[in-house]
Image: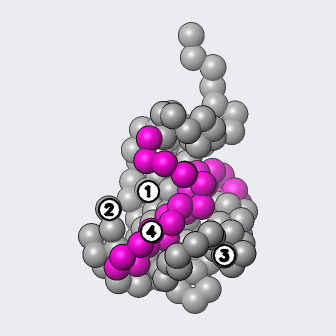
Amino acid sequence: MDQRAFGPRQLMVAFATHDGRFLTLLYARRTDPVDAALRACLQHFTAIGRAGEDRAAAVVLCDQPVDDGPATPEFVATFDRASELARQHDVHLVDWIACDDDRFRCARLRTFAPGTEAGWWDVPDLPQTS
């Protein structure tokens, strides 16, 4: 999915259960700093989107400028702040995907074959399955 699929200057958050079952998709206008938009989505999720789930995971897709080359310290700091904010709402932030008209960058996922990238879906305290 690219920036044009959900609109310019938007932030979208996909929420799932600990085992990856989709719960809801929320979005807000991107703010500056972006923390306020993420906070709004997290608060809405906590209020009406959690569907009784104690634990949840999320992935953010945000329309924002993406530069060529390695991730900037600002991009990494945004992911770190967002992860902490998500934790305050009992949500584990799995990844932050920044995209513009031409490029995208993930904070964590390095390939689009998650099965080969061990630890990417690193939701803490996963229940043991038998």
Quarter of image, res 25 = bottom left
Could you tell me the amino acid type at mark 1?
Ala
Question: Which residue is at 41% across, 72% downward?
Answer: 103
Q: Are marks 1 and 4 in contact (CB under 8 Å)?
A: no
Mark 4 vs mark 2: give the one in front: 4
Where is 115 relative to 83, above or below?
A: above
Question: Which residue is at 60% across, 54% downward?
Answer: 108
Q: Which residue is mark 4?
A: 104
Does residue 128 appear anywhere in the picture? yes
Mark 1 vs mark 2: give the one in front: 2
Percent across and percent down for residue 90 are 65, 52
In the image, farthest residue toward the bottom: 32
10 Å crowding of disc 2: few (<14), some (14-19), many (20+): few
Q: Secondary structure at mark 1?
A: strand
Q: Secondary structure at mark 2?
A: loop
10 Å crowding of disc 1: few (<14), some (14-19), many (20+): some
Q: Which residue is mark 3?
A: 72
Disc 4 from disc 3: Cα separation: 13 Å
Between discs 4 and 2, the one toward the N terminus = 2
Disc 1 from disc 2: Cα separation: 12 Å
Q: Which residue is mark 1?
A: 14
10 Å crowding of disc 4: few (<14), some (14-19), many (20+): many
